[in-house]
Image: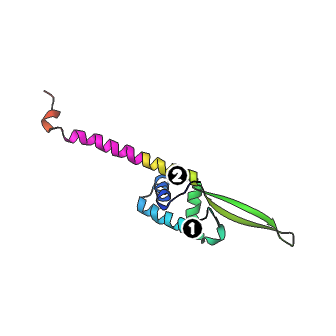
Amino acid sequence: MSVVTLEDLAMAISNRVNIDVESAMGDANFVMDLFGFEDRIIDNVLEPEDRQLFYILEEEGMLITEREETTIYDGRTWRTHYWFINKETILSYKEEKERTDKKKKEEENIAEIYEDIPDEMWFSR
């Protein structure tokens, strides 16, 4: 069973929603606080303005919604909506971020090679 950490979720959010890691850490902290050690929470715990973040994360595939229907004693249908953490997607987005960061660092290292070449070497004769 895979485990998603606060840092994993923050990196995934930063990568997919295109926000800085510090802002993503705040959003990830909020989400993880709500879920705690569970994979599922009931939608009723969310405030309407908080739900907007969940919709964004759902659009990116990091959260999944499901509903459960129950017939109550008077014959009416009672619907309960749940949010689930999509661990596999979050971890794949985190790894994508790590690969992107690694590639960016390699490109910066390659650029540093040219900084060591004296200016007079750049002129053709």
**Residue 24: x percent and y percent?**
46, 61
Q: What residue sits right under mark 1 in the picture? A: 36
Extreme residue in the front direction: 1
Q: Quadrant of residue 67?
A: bottom right
Residue type for callout 1? Gly
Q: Is residue 41 left or right of residue 110?
A: right
Q: In this view, does 58 lie to the left or right of 121?
A: right
Residue type for callout 2? Leu
- The quadrant of the rendering that contains the C terminus is top left
Q: What residue sits right under mark 2 in the picture? A: 91
Give the vertical position of 45 relative to 7 (above or below): below
Magenta stretch: residue 47 in it?
no
Residue at figure coordinates x 87%, y 69% from the top left: 75
**Residue 4: x percent and y percent?**
53, 57
Q: What stretch is highlighted in magenta?
A: 100-116
Residue at figure coordinates x 48%, y 52% from the top left: 94
**Residue 118: x percent and y percent?**
14, 38
Q: Is residue 82 left or right of residue 92?
A: right
